[in-house]
Amino acid sequence: MHLQLITLRGVSVDQEIYELMAPTSGGEISVFPGHEPIVTLAKPGALAVRYKKEDTDTQLEYFAISGGIVEINPDFIRVLVDEADHGDDIIEAESKAALDRALKLRDEAKDQIELDKAHALIDRHTVRLRVAELRRRRH
């Protein structure tokens, strides 16, 4: 089954995979070859990719994604998101510091616009930290 992970910066993944685990508005889903066709909303979370059937859980590749759309066909998956940060590219200390700044912004928000912006940053960095932790456990 072929996976395309596309962000605003371009194509992050464009290759054959065995399994995709994605956070969706209906909950976490796992997609295998031959899956029924669906289109669903992706929510911010950890996207996990298993490239070969015999790959163990320690060989999963993780991406921290923002919300978007997941299009699934029996032999093709397309994930369209604003951003997808590869687990190996996330520096845990930087994401923790950014989360702390976002929490401070939330606490000091003067209006709904500032509050919404702070919540978006909190969501982003919480997901990045989760993916960094998953990557750390893998190694």
Image (cartoon, rainbow, N blue to C red):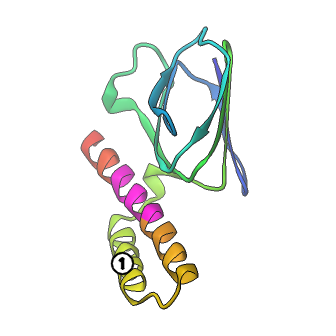
Q: Of all residues shown, which one is farthest toward the top? A: 34
106 or 50, nearer to the observer:
106
Quarter of the figure with residue 75? top right
Location of mark 1 (residue): 103
From the viewer's perspective, tell me whether residue 94 is left or right of residue 30: left
Q: Position of residue 12 (x, y in %)?
A: 65, 45
**Crowding at mark 1 (Cα within 10 Å: few <14, some 14-19, many 20+):** some
Identify the magenta region. Answer: 123-132
User: Would you place residue 78 above or below residue 31 in this image?
Assistant: below
Q: From what the image shows, is residue 124 above or below residue 97?
A: above
Secondary structure mostly seen in magenta is helix
Q: Residue furthest front?
A: 112
Q: Is residue 5 above or below residue 53?
A: below
Q: Secondary structure at mark 1?
A: helix
Residue 99, quarter of the rendered image? bottom left
Residue 128 magenta-drawn? yes
Residue 11 image offset from top left, x and y in percent: 72, 45
- Tell me if 90 is positioned left or right of 2 in this view: left
